[in-house]
Image: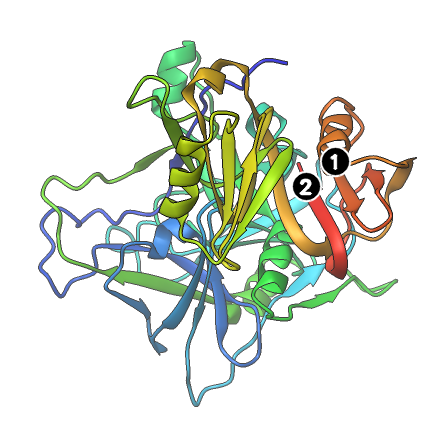
Amino acid sequence: MRVVGRVFLTALLMSAAETNARAEEPRSSGTGFTVTGDGWLMTNAHVVEGCERIEVKGRGIASDPRIDSTNDLALIKLSSDKPWTPLTFRRAPTRLGEDIVAIGYPLADLLSDSVKITTGNVNALAGLKNDTRYIQISTPIQPGNSGGPVVDRDGFLLGITSATFSKKAADEIGITAQNVNFAIRASVADLFMQAQSITSLSGDKVAGQPVLSTADLAEKVSPSVHQVLCYAKVQPQASMQREETVTSLPRPMVPGGLLDATGYDAIGFDYATLKEVSYQDCRNACDRDGQCKAITYNAKHRFCFLKNNVVALIRNGDAMAAYSSTKAADIIMSDFTSYSGMDIPGGDYKRIRQTNYLECFVSCIGDTACKAFAYVAKKKECWLKDELGRPKAAKGIELGVK
């Protein structure tokens, strides 16, 4: 299998006045939306990362940011005497071509500072390089839309505005791509919320209920959507857009040394486990061991797994991986994200018995129908799935989602 190439996305977050901003003026702005009745808001990670203070305009200062940089998601908490109106996550799968609406605060310091709405369609059920965490959408989006909701014509959440095809990528391939935009699937956001022990609302359209007009839809959804302001010290010559390398491998710094891959799990055969150690201790143990080719460090539990082989990297927000530079050319940079203690009920089309996690992963990555897999370690069973439904907590299951 070949290593996936470099792909560029332009993250949409910066305000036009950043370069001349004073210390107490927002460095950048984006959009967020309410997901719980007690004041949790969701936005993009790139909207709030590096902020000294996060403000939700008109509602106060946010606290306790929860960041998932791998999937470009963030949760922030606010306290307010005013009621919060959370959006409802749609249970039904997204359909190709269905009508959608994006809501946010684009170009708020150039145009009006009020909420804005744009309409469009679902153009594809995956993002660049078949990344199924995303859907491709035609709703026009601008800087400031980042983190805003994408809803269906009934107001149910389908995705979170995240990125657009960048000019740099267009220049590299020699094609001017028009209106190619991407939103993170609501199901990925729901998994993130469950990992943070925050419960979302979910539902579906009631049979026979009439479709809302665009005006009625804007009136229904806009109270849940808020402008998010990032305050920080001004950086000299700050960039107005971020070019994000989605699937690139780190470059070797020292020949034969270990390469870091934060936010990833190295997939290989574990031959030793160290407990209650730091990441540096984990790396040092691998350096001293001649058979060690890679490590995975679980920061949450302070566990270190030494591996005598490595075939792929899989996204995992709780993990930090490192691998030998001599293996770099052979590693698969996968489109999977790993979740512990999670499952997606339904969609099972194949069961593999008496197997291990690595074989389960390889079986899914080599099957074009497979969108996710669930590995049950206790039974040594692997379930391949061709549908992505609503996730739920499930003890003892390792879930991998493309």
Residue 104 in which image quadrant:
bottom left
Please give the name of the residue rendered at 54% of the width and 38% of the height, measured from the top-left corner. 306
Numbered badge on residue 371? 1
Left or right of 335, for residue 243: left
Image location of residue 223, percent across then percent down: 50, 71
* Residue 82 seen in the current view: yes
- Dot 2 alpha-carbon crowd within 10 angstroms: few under 14, some 14 to 19, many 20 or more: many
Q: Earlier in the sequence, mark 2 or mark 1?
A: 1
Q: Residue at x 38, y 13 (%)?
A: 172
Q: Is residue 319 above or below residue 259?
A: below
Asked if disc 2 and disc 1 are in contact, CB closer than 8 Å, the reply is: yes
- Amino acid at dot 2: Val
Is 357 placed above or below 299 here? above
Q: Name the quarter where the C terminus is drawn.
A: top right
Query: Which residue in the protein does label 2 denote?
Result: 401
Residue 356 position within the rendered picture, expressed as x and y whole percent measured from the top left? 77, 36
